[in-house]
Image (cartoon, rainbow, N blue to C red):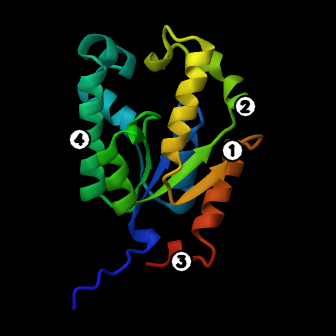
Amino acid sequence: MNAKRAIPVREKNIVLIGFMGVGKTTIGKLVAEKLYRDFIDIDQEIERDFQMSIPEMFTQKGEAFFRKTEKEYIVHMCEHTKGKIVSLGGGSFQQEEIRKKCLEHCFVIFLDLTWENWKERIDLLLENRPILHNRSIEQVKQLFNERKSIYALHHLRVETDNLSAEEVADCIVDALNPGGELYQS
């Protein structure tokens, strides 16, 4: 018999997706702590291994190099790790291979934020988000809306408007763990 057994969530990586600045890293760390799992931020892994920031990588090596590297890291994570909480960069899910691998091997959670609430954070994001440089607010809104359609492919959507990172993390843990099965070994 060749039936494929469904892998329980407790054995999968839990991947957080969403637009830049939604709080994937902050919330991911909290969820990892609450579920006693390791946390991986793909962008931070790349920065550590290349010993440069993402903005520096965009400037020195180009976006195409960064996207290729990002894909290699995420595909490797999907295929070779399990049980981690993983934060992806805001643009990574645009790559079809990344989407397919994450949706097949992981439990993907979309952290959703309205444009109005995201716009309030833009001043905090400009310096470290090279994708925002030299774009008008209208162009950023278009990018926000384009990516939102890509983020629609997920296993769970969590609205983050008007919630603290702690409240969002609690929502995720509650949604993932209705009967306590994540804590069973």
Which residue bears the numbered disc 3? 181
Q: Which residue is mark 4?
A: 72
Q: Position of residue 127 (x, y in %)?
A: 52, 13
Label 1 or label 2, whichever comes before in sequence order: 2
Mark 1 or mark 4, which is nearer the start of the sequence? 4
Tell me the element at label 4.
Answer: helix
The secondary element bearing badge 1 is classed as loop
Alpha carbon separation for disc pair 1 and 2: 9 Å
The kind of residue on which mark 4 rests is: Glu
Residue at image mark 1: 160
Quarter of the rendering containing residue 53: top left
Please tell me which residue is depicted at 68% across the width and 24% down the height of the picture. 119
Q: Say if 7 sits above or below 117 in the image.
A: below
Residue 179 vertical position relative to residue 75 in the rendered view, above or below:
below
Q: Is residue 43 visible?
A: yes
Secondary structure beneath label 2: helix
Real-space Cα separation, disc 2 to disc 3, in angstroms: 34 Å
- Of pointers 3 and 4, the one earlier in the residue sequence: 4
Residue 17 visible, this angle: no
Position in image of residue 117 (x %, y %): 72, 31
- Amino acid, disc 1: Thr
Q: Nearer the viewer, residue 79 or 44?
A: 79
